[in-house]
């Protein structure tokens, strides 16, 4: 079971909603009501973008002694040690497995992990996707890859 990120997650949920997305005028900037939360892109949404996934996997799959990777992210979100070891042995990308298992979380929560582990490179890629690709998908300008 994944552990919640805590109060920081609520702050990031709505702040990653693109500016042109309409929301209730009575909602505050950092509103966490169910309507506003539904507008925030989830990891499930980014799983439909193969190019983005390839970039994230290239950045988070490698194991390096001084650079935080998928393993740190998964551990922070509560993945047990045995499961971490199991995913390392599988032929599929461990980053992809981590993302699939946390697909209900928001991209904002994932970006918070990037900040926590000083992965500005991954955060930048996610930020660009939230700012540029996500709004286009909402308006149907970009086909989803299933």
Image: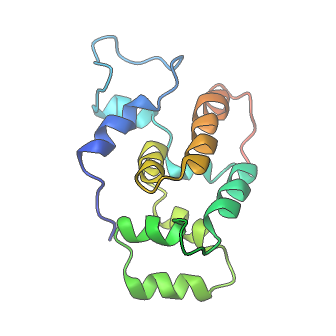
Q: Residue 146, can we see it?
A: no
Where is residue 120 shown, x and y percent of the image?
55, 46
Direction from residue 101 to residue 138 in the image, left or right? right
Direction from residue 57 to residue 51 in the image, left or right? right
Q: Residue 39, can we see it?
A: yes
Q: Residue at horizontal 39%, vertical 71%?
A: 75
Where is residue 116 shown, x and y percent of the image?
40, 53
Asked if 125 appears above or below 142 in the picture, the reply is below
Q: Residue at horizontal 66%, vertical 60%?
A: 59
Direction from residue 31 to residue 108 in the image, left or right? right
Q: Nearer the viewer, residue 136 or 107?
A: 107
Where is residue 119 shown, x and y percent of the image?
53, 53
Name which quarter of the figure residue 60 lies in.
bottom right
Q: Residue furthest top?
A: 25
Direction from residue 68 to residue 122 in the image, left or right? right
Where is residue 117 shown, x and y percent of the image?
45, 57
């Amino acid at each position: 079971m994944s552990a919640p990120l805590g109060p920081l997650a609520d702050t990031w949920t709505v702040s990653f909603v693109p500016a042109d997305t309409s929301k209730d005028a009575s909602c505050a900037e950092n509103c966490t009501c169910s309507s506003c939360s539904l507008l925030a892109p989830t990891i499930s949404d980014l799983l439909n973008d193969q190019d983005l996934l390839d970039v994230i996997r290239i950045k988070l799959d490698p194991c390096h002694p001084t650079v935080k990777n998928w393993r740190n992210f998964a551990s922070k979100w509560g993945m047990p040690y045995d499961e971490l070891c199991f995913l390392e042995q599988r032929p599929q990308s461990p980053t992809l497995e981590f993302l699939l298992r946390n697909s209900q979380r928001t991209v904002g929560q994932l970006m918070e992990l990037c900040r926590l582990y000083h992965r500005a490179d991954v955060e930048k890629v996610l930020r660009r996707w939230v700012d540029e690709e996500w709004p286009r998908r909402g308006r149907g300008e970009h086909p989803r890859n299933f």
